[in-house]
């Protein structure tokens, strides 16, 4: 820090859209409705969504987050997270006669269906995604047959398959068209017969939030992304800001703000990952008031009005 004072006025430009997507809203709503209908505890396999504040809030209300189903008592209501689960997890719940509510995002479920369809055609499958991510592990576990995980263009260039004429690809939903374009192009160069879903099948929420950051970067000196460190889409928003030449920070909440970030800064772009609640965004705005007067501007963006149907178990709560 050079000792200079932050500006007395910060113009904060809010990304539009930002924060919760329809799949996240649905998953959280499912747990809340289950708590209301069946009472606590409600067991959730893995984090319902990748946000620490959301998980802690639900935990305080009686949700119990577990890594594996053997931690769930006999007969206890169990929720599968928005990221989806492998078939063996579904089978394990069935073997124990656990009452289950599936909060898998419908867009993730669509990827599962595409993968199974390609496998039924006798195709090997290339999954474009991040190793270790809950969605990727669930998707691989939903498909019978060979699945190759590809994370980078370099992975695509090195990929060796059994039959190049019987090859397909699917993608992790929290990657955008921009994230996957280069990898898909490399796959098509190497394997001209490869087939895959149309780009319109990419998660709309991921694409919209990334496009908003592109727009923000043209207008601001600094970009703040509200989201948790284990959120794939939140990390990507920060990376895009950096790639576009703007200082960018991923923060859980206002407590992470650091005064030196605002030295010489007059315009701040503020967004949130798809699993971050709006209350945290407003808290960050309040937190920035310690550095001076805050003026708010809303970025023009793509409106989102998607609503996903709730599972029958909680639809009437």
Image: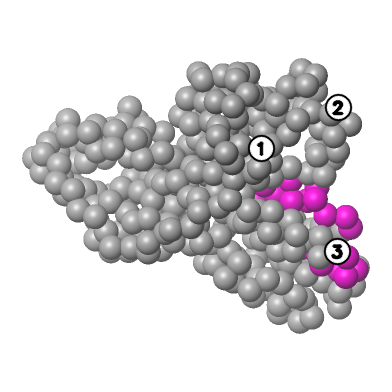
In this rendering, the answer to whether 106 lies above or below 72 is below
Give the x, y percent position of residue 297.
Answer: 20, 53
Mark 3, residue position: 119
Q: Is residue 257 left or right of residue 167?
A: left
Residue assigned mark 2? 96
Work out whether residue 167 or residue 240 is closer to the camera in this orientation and state it. 167
> Which dot, 1 or 3, sits closer to the camera?
1
Label 2 or label 1, whichever comes before in sequence order: 2
Taking the spot 76% from the left edge, 81% from the top edge, the residue there is 192
Residue 125 is one of the magenta-drawn residues: yes
Question: Which badge, 1 or 3, comes first in the chain's sequence?
Answer: 3
- Colour setup of the view: one colour
Magenta span: 118-145
Residue 313: give its label. Answer: 1
State the residue at coordinates (70%, 29%): 78
Q: How packed is label 3: few (under 14 Cα within 10 Å), some, or many (20 or more)?
A: many
Binning the other alpha carbons within 10 Å of mark 2 as few (below 14), some (14 to 19) or many (20 upward) gives some
Label 1 sits on a secondary structure element that is loop
The quadrant in which the N terminus is found is top left
Circle 3 SS class: helix
């Amino acid at each position: 820090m050079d000792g200079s004072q932050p500006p007395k006025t910060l113009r904060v430009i809010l990304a539009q859209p930002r924060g919760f997507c329809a799949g996240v809203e649905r998953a959280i709503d499912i747990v809340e409705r289950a708590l209301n209908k069946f009472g606590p505890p409600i067991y959730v396999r893995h984090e319902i969504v990748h946000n620490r504040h959301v998980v802690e809030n639900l935990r305080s209300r009686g949700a119990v987050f577990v890594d594996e189903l053997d931690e769930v008592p006999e007969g206890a209501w169990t929720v599968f997270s928005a990221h989806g689960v492998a078939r063996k997890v579904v089978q394990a719940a069935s073997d124990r006669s656990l009452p289950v509510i599936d909060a898998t995002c419908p867009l993730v479920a669509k990827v599962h269906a595409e993968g199974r369809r390609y496998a039924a055609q006798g195709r090997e499958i290339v999954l474009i995604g991040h190793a270790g991510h809950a969605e990727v592990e669930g998707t691989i576990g939903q498909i019978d047959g060979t699945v190759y995980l590809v994370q980078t263009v370099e992975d695509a260039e090195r990929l060796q398959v059994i039959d190049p004429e019987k090859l397909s690809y699917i993608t992790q939903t929290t990657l955008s068209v921009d994230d996957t374009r280069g990898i898909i192009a490399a796959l098509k160069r190497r394997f001209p017969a490869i087939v895959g879903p149309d780009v319109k099948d990419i998660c709309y929420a991921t694409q919209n939030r990334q496009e908003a950051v592109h727009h923000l970067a043209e207008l601001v000196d600094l970009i703040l992304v509200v989201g948790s460190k284990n959120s794939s889409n939140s990390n990507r928003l920060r990376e895009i800001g950096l790639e576009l030449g703007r200082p960018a920070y991923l923060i859980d909440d206002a407590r992470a703000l650091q005064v030196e970030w605002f030295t010489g800064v007059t315009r701040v772009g503020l967004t949130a990952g798809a699993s971050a609640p709006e209350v945290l965004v407003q808290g960050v705005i309040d937190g920035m008031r310690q550095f001076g007067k805050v003026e708010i501007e809303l970025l023009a963006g793509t409106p989102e009005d998607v609503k996903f149907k709730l599972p029958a178990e909680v639809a009437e709560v």
